[in-house]
Structure formats: C-alpha cells, structure tokens
C-alpha cells in the first residue's frame, strides 16, 4: 500500500531542520493538550489518552512547513498517545520511515 505522503525535501535537508521541527511540534502539541484539558469539565467521565488523534492532526501545518508534505493520517497511532513526547517521537519516526521508502531502489 502506498502512503499518501510524498516528502518534498531530501533526507539531508530534513536532518538540518529535524531539531527545530521536533521542538515546534512539541510546543504546538503542548498548547493543544493544555487547551483540551481546559475544556474538559470532568476528566474521569471519559477515558481518553493524554494526546488524541485530533490534537495530532492539528500539527499537520507544522509538518508541512518543514517537509512540504501534510501529515498522513495513517501515521497517527490508533488510540492516541500517553504523552506529548511519545506523540512527537512517533510522528518523527513516521517521517523517517517515509524517507526510507523513497530511498529504496
């Protein structure tokens, strides 16, 4: 199955922006999670992950700004993530897997 994503930068270009991308993704998700927690009236009412898929989808513009491609929804782990660092690390891993796919002969 082909991924919908197609990276517009090279791996070398990605390596140059990787740290900045990770930092910005972390900041954006932290803000998104804080806002979601603020909106929740009764946390015990719903058993939801710390970072849900909707929050991760909202960081797609950041991914696109750095890589030229939107975040592929298939990159998001079903069931969400226990923390912002876990979510960011997973998305970064998915990006790197895309480079591996495009570099195959």
Image (spheres, helix red, strand yellow):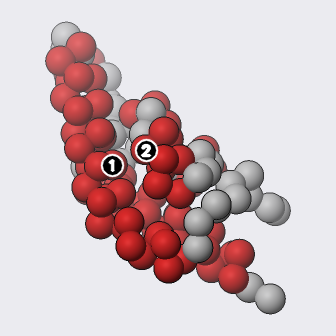
Q: Compare residues 98 and 10 and report the one nearer the observer.
A: 10
Left or right of residue 43, residue 97 in this image? right
Q: Compare residues 68 and 2 and report the one nearer the observer.
A: 68
Local crowd size for mark 1, using a 10 Å CA cut-off: few (<14), some (14–19), many (≥20): many
Q: Compare residues 60 and 14 and report the one nearer the observer.
A: 14
Q: Is residue 19 visible?
A: yes
Q: Which mark is residue 73?
A: none
Provide residue 45's location: percent of width, then percent of height: 26, 18
Q: Is residue 98 above or below residue 87?
A: below
Examine the image and state in which quarter residue 19 appears.
Answer: bottom left
Q: Which residue is mark 1?
A: 25
Q: Which residue is mark 2?
A: 62
Query: Disc 2 or disc 1, which is closer to the eye?
Result: 2
Provide residue 18's location: percent of width, then percent of height: 37, 67
Q: Which is more N-terminal, label 1 or label 2? A: 1
Provide residue 4's location: percent of width, then percent of height: 74, 52
Q: Quadrant of the N terminus?
A: bottom right
Q: Does dot 2 land on a helix, a strand or a loop?
A: helix
> Which residue is found at the position 19% from the left and 11% from the top?
41
Asked if the residue under mark 1 is in contact with the one under mark 2, i.e. CB atoms within 8 Å, the reply is yes
> Which residue is found at the position 61% from the left and 51% from the top?
69
Q: How many marks?
A: 2
């Amino acid at each position: 199955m082909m991924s919908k994503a197609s990276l517009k930068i090279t791996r070398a270009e990605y390596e140059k922006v990787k740290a900045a991308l990770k930092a910005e993704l972390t900041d954006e998700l932290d803000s998104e999670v804080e806002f979601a927690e603020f909106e929740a009236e009764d946390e015990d009412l719903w058993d939801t992950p710390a970072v849900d898929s909707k929050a991760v989808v909202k960081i797609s513009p950041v991914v696109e700004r750095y890589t030229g491609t939107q975040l592929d929804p298939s990159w998001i782990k079903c069931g969400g993530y226990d923390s912002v660092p876990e979510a960011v690390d997973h998305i970064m891993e998915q990006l790197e897997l895309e480079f591996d796919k495009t570099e195959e002969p």
